Image (cartoon, rainbow, N blue to C red):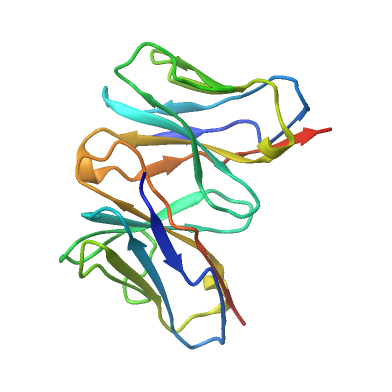
Amino acid sequence: GAVVSQHPSRVICKSGTSVKIECRSLDFQATTMFWYRQFPKQSLMLMATSNEGSKATYEQGVEKDKFLINHASLTLSTLTVTSAHPEDSSFYICSPTRTANTEAFFGQGTRLTVV
Amino acid sequence: AQTVTQSQPEMSVQEAETVTLSCTYDTSESNYYLFWYKQPPSRQMILVIRQEAYKQQNATENRFSVNFQKAAKSFSLKISDSQLGDTAMYFCAFMNYGGSQGNLIFGKGTKLSVKP
């Protein structure tokens, strides 16, 4: 199976500060990383897609300067929420995939609360 | 663009009984994957079952089975002998066939409650 580790699981930060979320694929090489966001009682929505060594592609309505994605290696990707505001409070889930994937793997998710 | 529709926001079932969750989707692709994911209160996404569109046979995993109707673009999930641990949000999801471009498109989810 595929083991994915996402940290932290919960974080509370003050408005205006930045938060970094890490996602690691522990037993496979992730050529692509998907980042999803889930607001309370809603579904998962794709935020951005990144390929190792390349700039991320953001979905419409997602600010690339606010949500910085780094995918510098095949086993690690990070999402940094910059200048966080209360409306950024949400559940963030990473999903690393490998070439010719036939299913998705997910991290445990990060519950971000901005106060 | 692909869309996934789950028309049942909430469902409930008695323990040991059978329940069916509905899902329809829209796509112009001929090759794709369909999934049902379970999200318990921990919010960890757990794969329940997967169906390849090119396979006519319906997928089954123990108490979970699907009714895949490709022409109708319908993909329902049947849970037999429901257990209390089945209580969770269930998401139907679509993924294009084609390697690393395969992000998932999710439905809005169905909250299933299994009652003792």
Q: Residue furthest left?
A: A53
- Whether residue A16 is visible to the viewer of this picture, yes or no, is yes
From the viewer's perspective, is B16 left or right of A16?
right
Q: Residue furthest right?
A: B116
Which quadrant of the figure has residue A65? bottom left
- Where does residue A74 sit, x and y in percent of width and height? 21, 61
**Residue located 70% across and 26% down the image:** B82
Q: Is B93 above or below relative to B19?
A: below
**How many badges with numbers are in the image?**
0
**Residue located 67% across and 36% down the image:** B86
- Whether residue B28 is visible to the viewer of this picture, yes or no, is no
**Residue located 26% across and 40% down the image:** A101
- Where does residue B26 sit, x and y in percent of width and height? 40, 28
Q: Considering depth in this image, is A107 or B109 the residue closer to the camera?
A: A107
- Where does residue A89 sit, x and y in percent of width and height? 56, 71
- Where does residue A61 sit, x and y in percent of width and height? 39, 62
Q: Is B40 above or below relative to B98?
A: below
Q: Quadrant of the N terminus of chain A?
A: top left
From the viewer's perspective, is B16 left or right of A100?
right
Which quadrant of the figure has residue A31? bottom left
**Residue located 52% across and 72% down the image:** A88
Q: Quadrant of the C terminus of chain A?
A: bottom right
